[in-house]
Amino acid sequence: METGDKGPIWREETIHTEQIFQGRVISLQVDTVALPDGKQATREIVRHPGASAVVALLDGKLLVVDQYRKPMDKFQIEIPAGKLDAGEDPMEAAARELEEETGYRANNLKLVSAFYTSPGFADEKLYLYFSDQLEAGEQQLDEDEDLRVEAITMEQADAYIAEGRISDAKTIVAVYAWKLYLVTGTI
């Protein structure tokens, strides 16, 4: 048990883990945990290797990709991103994904933040990087990847958020980081 600002909080001890699914990207397990009152509960947990994404500015515009996302059954505008390969450095993954998806390379990458995408059920940690120094590279999409690259203005980004065309957390965080950059000149 730990003590927080409002009194004691507890840690759930794992009693048993049952592996339910092991895929190429994620795995799913169900943990049985002990609660402080002696009761037990179950926790469904998605394990993910982590991911990197890039707030990439090209001539003052944000590079995004427009692609179909099956889990939501809709087209989604997002910043370039992808999962970490085993043992891969998050910054290297960000650079790789930026070039593979957009055809641009970053001459520098700066870490904006690292955050958990949905800690209530998943351990995916996303590393968000920034670059405003890009040069032409070579787009190399995966076999099953079909997307359109676009450079958008802040006004377009705000409109896409309002319309729901941008609705994922990493891209919304990226837009707000970009706004902070425009106001302060730093990330």
Image: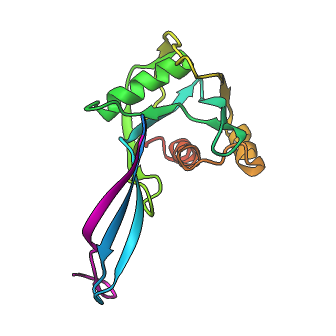
- In the image, what residue occupies the spot 65% across and 26% down? 151
Q: Residue furthest left?
A: 1
Q: Position of residue 149 (x, y in %)?
A: 64, 23
Residue 98: x and y in percent read 48, 24
Report the front residue among 11 and 154. 11
Residue 69 located within the stretch drawn in magenta: no
Q: How many marks?
A: 0
Is residue 141 found left or right of 161 in the rendered image? Answer: left
The image quadrant where one finds the C terminus is: top left
Give the residue displayed 44% in from the left and 60% down from the top.
Answer: 121
For the residue pair 43 and 89, the one nearer the viewer reads as 43
Which range of residues does the magenta coloring cover?
Answer: 1-22
Is residue 86 depicted above or below 173 in this figure? above
Residue 92 location in percent, x, y?
A: 33, 26
Q: Position of residue 101 (x, y in %)?
A: 54, 22
Rendering quarter of residue 69: top right
Q: Can you say whether 18 is above or below 26 in the image?
A: below
Which quadrant, please, contains the N terminus? bottom left
